[in-house]
Every structure is written in C-alpha cells, then in structure tokens.
Amino acid sequence: MNEEEGLLSRNLACVKCQCRLLTLRGFDDVVIDSCPTCHGTWYDSGELEQVLGDAFDYKALLSIVSSRLSEYICPCCKMSMRALVFKFHSGELVIDNCPVCRGFWLDGGELASVRNLVEAIREGVAPVKVGFSSARPVSSLAGTFSLDDRLLLKNSALDHYRSVDYETGAEISQIPTSSYLFAFLTALPVEVFNPVRAPALGLYAMIIVNIVLYIHTASLLPGEYLPYMREIGMVPADVLAGKLYSLLTSMFLHSHFWHLFANMYVLYVFGDNVYDLFNDHGKVKGPLLFLSFYLIVGVFSSIVHIVLTFFNPVMSALPVVGASGAVSGVMAAYWRAFPKTRIYQIIFCYPFKIPIWVYLGIWILMNVAIAFAAGSNARISWQAHIGGFIAGYFLIPHFLPFRLENLQPEDKKLSGSH
C-alpha cells in the first residue's frame, strides 16, 4: 500500500491499541484508516469490496462462516463487533466485522489472507462450512492455495473431520420441519451436525442390496417364505452343524418392512461418516475394508447370539435375520470416532439434542433391560445387538488408515488470527 501523509480529521481510535487512526489514500484511491503502531486497518462499508474487487461478496461471505462475539469495539458505532471464523483443515482465519455499519477491521497482514481466501472461494476451494445442519457432502477441494503461512488444504477424511467444529455446528443447527416430522412419526434419530467429506457410495450400494433382497423375500408365496428364511437365515442349530454361510447371508435379510427400514436408516445415519473415514485407504481398498469390517462385526454378533441361546432348544431352532448386529457395530464405531456429535430425538414433541454417548448409552440400557426381562426367549436379539456393538467398538481402531486419536482436532490458528 502506498501510504501518503495521514489526515487526522476522522478522529477514529484503533480498536486494538487505541492509537489514533491515520486516514490514508490506498489501493485504487480507496480511502482507508490505518494504525501507525499495529498496522491494522479499518474499512468502512463497501471499502473492502473496492479493494478486493467483484469477487468479494458480503452476503456470500457471511453464508460460509460461523461467528462469535469479538473482543473489539467498532471505532465508528462504538458497538461490539463480531468475529467471522473461516474454518480450514489446519486452522482458522478470524476477521472482525461490525454488523451495524458493516465495516471490517483487519489486523496487520490479514488483508493478504483475505485476498487469498476470496480468490480460493471464487475458484471453488471453499472453507469447511460451519453451522449447517445437513450431513450432505462437503465439496472435494479443487486444488491448493496459500494463506500467509502457505496453508495447504488436504483432500482427506482425516483433515476434514479434524477441522469440523462440532460444538459451533451443533449449537447453530436447527432441525428442519421435514426432519422433525420424520423423527416424530418414526421415533428414529436425526443427526444434528456431522458433514461428510464425500458420498458413501459403497454404503448406498449395501443398502440397495438389502432392499432388493427384501423385495424378493416379500414376493415369495406363503409356502415358500419360511423355507427360504430357514435356508438363508441364521439358524443357530444349523450353524453348529456346519451351515456357516448363513452367518453372512442372514444379515442381508429382513422379516418385514419396518425391520428393513429401521436398520437401513440407522446404517445410513451412522454409517456414512464411518465409511468416509475408510476412504483414506483409497478408492478401492477403502470400500472393501469397510465391507470387511461390516461383515466381521455382523458375524461376531451372530456368534454371540448362538452362544447365549445354546441351551434354549426353541430359540436355537428359529432363524435369525437382519442387519442389526452389524449396524450396532457401525454405531459403536461412530461413537468412538465422533464422540462430540449429537443426535436429535423427539421426546414428547420436543426435539432434544442428545450427545451421542447419552443416546447410545440409553440404547444399550434398553437392550440390557430386554435381556433381564425375557432372557434367551426374547424375540429381539439383544445378544446380537450387544455383541455387534462390542465388536465394532474394539475393532474400529484396527481398520482405520490412521490412529483414532488423530481425529481429535488440534487448536491451531493461522497467523494473523486472534
């Protein structure tokens, strides 16, 4: 910036060090106010747009940030400013804005960071979105760009989830009317905030396979239905006699529509983020390893059911079908990977934001209650639920391409932020 001799006519004080701001003629004859001590700059409404050009869109800018109360007071309005937080994969950039007069305060050196940010957004490389309730995929990064510290945005699930601000996102998020009605009518949970990096295509394919097999099962004649279930489903006595393949096939069968719907919906809610983590293994290896994890957990859940019904001849002779054992393992993996997430649950018409550990803790207690109430005669396989949950909880660290604790974000900030 070409700094000419300052004019003191405005009598504005620096928001940071309280020195008197010098009114200077800067970029393209735009008049701005600068502090001679800390080199911070104040831009009145419209001035930052003039400096950065047409690519700077005030409304668009506010749509991709979270905000919090700033420590600064607007030098013009004498009102509290807000800190606009741009979340990146390795930290955050914070700039200060007055919501009343729409002026901006930039610390020394931050203008270059904002300029690079605006250019990156124009090229399709957006910061991680914070404060959106839907779990739709965040667009893959089109490239890399540098801020003041040559920050590189990496296109990996690990970097993506380390950058997600779960606290801010969950606090800002509100449940849409359609999601509220769905949760109210079905009593099923709705994820509050955990945006995926990429679509879980392999998971969707698994769900489709379950749906297709259910349609086939539902089309069977009455005399064909039970023999088919006994052949493809998991009958504990038959497994012990050597019919091992049914440990796998049984988890893709469902006895009725709501059985299928509940399992596939819960698999979708919890599975897309877990599947996303496996993508860091590679486009081929990741989906195959996720499928392996799913099948191993499902088989283990069936084995637990067999062991705990071994001395019950009636239950040992009945076919067991459903994906709930494997889905329970995915739920446990989700809990370990994303312990700060929350779940919407409609209770007495009110949408509660329940921490994931509370939600799954209640789910476990419900299965334990069924176990005490009905024992091995229960029509719901609490054995498979708990067995799958235990397997998923302890196996997930061994399937990820990184250490599980590395998912926890570090409190990093870009230079120039505060």
Image (tube, rainbow, N blue to C red):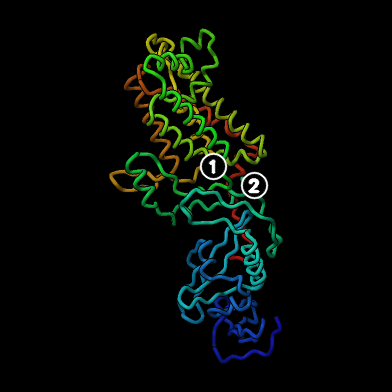
The residue at which mark 1 appears reads as 273
- Towards the viewer: 113 or 21: 113
Horizontal relation, residue 4 to residue 167: left or right: right
- Find residue 156 and name its label: 2
- Looking at the image, which residue is at 58% across and 30% down? 291
At mark 1, the secondary structure is helix
At mark 2, the secondary structure is loop
Identity of the residue furthest to the left in this view: 348
- Looking at the image, which residue is at 59% across and 82% down? 19
Horizontal relation, residue 239 to residue 113: left or right: left
Q: Which image quadrant for residue 200?
A: top right
Q: Amino acid at mark 2?
A: Ser
Residue 74 in the image, given as x and y percentages of width and height: 50, 77
Look at the picture and state if 4 lies above or below 107: below
Q: Amino acid at mark 1?
A: Asn
Residue 22 in the image, given as x and y percentages of width and height: 61, 86
- Towards the viewer: 30 or 172: 30
Q: Which image quadrant for residue 95?
A: bottom right
Label 1 to label 2: alpha-carbon separation: 13 Å
Task: Tell me the crowding category of disc 1: few under 14, some 14 to 19, or many 20 or more residues within 10 angstroms, Cα based.
Answer: many
Horizontal relation, residue 303 to residue 152: left or right: left
- Give the quadrant of the C terminus: bottom right
- Find residue 371 and name its label: none
Look at the picture and state if 171 lies above or below 254: below
Q: How many marks?
A: 2
Residue 366 in the image, given as x and y percentages of width and height: 36, 30
- Towards the viewer: 30 or 333: 30
